Image (cartoon, grey):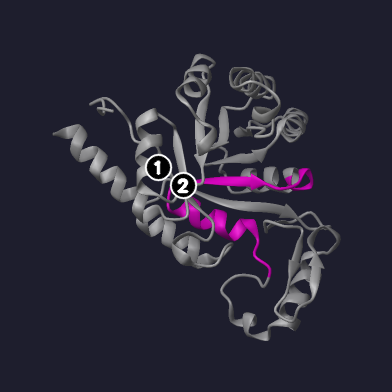
Amino acid sequence: MTMSRLAKFPLITAHTGCMGYPEHSLESVQAAMSLGADVYEDDIRATCDGVAVLAHDNEVRLADGQNINIATMSTRELDEAILQADPSLADSPLEPFPRAEALMRVVKNARAKMNLDIKTDASLKPVFDLIVKLGMQEHAFLSGCGYETAAEALRLQNRLGLVIHKLLNVDASSFKRMNYDEAVAMACEHALETKCFGLNAPYHLVQPVFLEEAAAHGLDVYVWTLEKASDMRKMAEMGVASITTRDPATLIAVKNEWETARDS
């Protein structure tokens, strides 16, 4: 496909754990920001005392083999358990169990955007509070929201009088239950109902008709998670709004090639 001279390259979203650094780490977000990523994505859960923390799963295995349950523990209890399992973490620049706030501050200072991948509805209120506290209403957005979570987020933001930007996570299983066009139409309908600004989809689900239908409804399309340069080029040429990757350096190289070709 020939690249349009007017085409804009997708936003570069760095996935947590990018460039080989540990997930939910300061090193990962710093690497992404130093490379020039537009967006940084991390997974958000909440403790029982209502603090937004970084974790993909609710159950976490510690260095000593113990399993802990994030939702049933306070931040103090989490920190104590982490340090008991691995006392060396006492020297970490972050709290023993990573908080969302610390990484959000790094992203804000870099003038990038934070993609808050919501893993549980219990994290919505703590995340809203953080977005307001840090003044990041235009520099943070929610992802990971299926239809029900997006609807709950909308109810909460209306109750609090807030404008919180969010993506609707596409229900991948709907593409197995329904024909492709129907699944895309349903995703767009759900996004509009819940006032999402776009759709967040596994890249392999995205075809031209997906993008056309989304554009017809004024919805952006964000895709995840790509590692091959060839797939990155394909998605960029199709016109997605953002590409998520654990290898932002490769995506930046693809962007540089794109811009050279566009300007030649």
In reply to whether residue 94 is colored magenta, the answer given is no
Q: Earlier in the sequence, mark 1 or mark 2?
A: 2
Rendering quarter of residue 249: bottom left
Looking at the picture, tell me which residue is in the foreground, 222 or 173: 173
The kind of residue tagged 1 is Asp
Using the image as rendered, state which of residue 16 and residue 112 is in the foreground: 16
Q: Quadrant of the C terminus?
A: top left
Give how far across and how far down residue 205 sits, in percent.
54, 33
Q: Is residue 141 above or below residue 207?
A: below
Whole-angstrom CA distance, mark 1 to mark 2, is 7 Å
Give the left or right position of residue 68, taking residue 38 as reference.
right
Q: Is residue 26 above or below residue 145?
A: below
Q: Give the magenta part as a residue range.
A: 97-123
Circle 1 — which element? helix
Q: Residue 110 vs residue 118: left or right? A: left
Q: Residue at x 54, y 16 (%)?
A: 217
Q: Which mark is residue 226?
A: 2
Could you say whether the residue bearing mark 2 is in a helix, strand or loop? Answer: loop
Please report the residue visible at 59 percent of the width from the left and 53 percent of the height from the top.
Answer: 42
Q: Do the residues under discs 1 and 2 have CB atoms within 8 angstroms?
A: yes
Q: Is residue 156 left or right of residue 212?
A: right
- The residue under label 1 is 231
Q: Which mark is residue 151?
A: none
How crowded is the residue under tag 2: few (<14 C-alpha within 10 Å), some, or many (20+)? many
**Outermost residue, right side:** 72
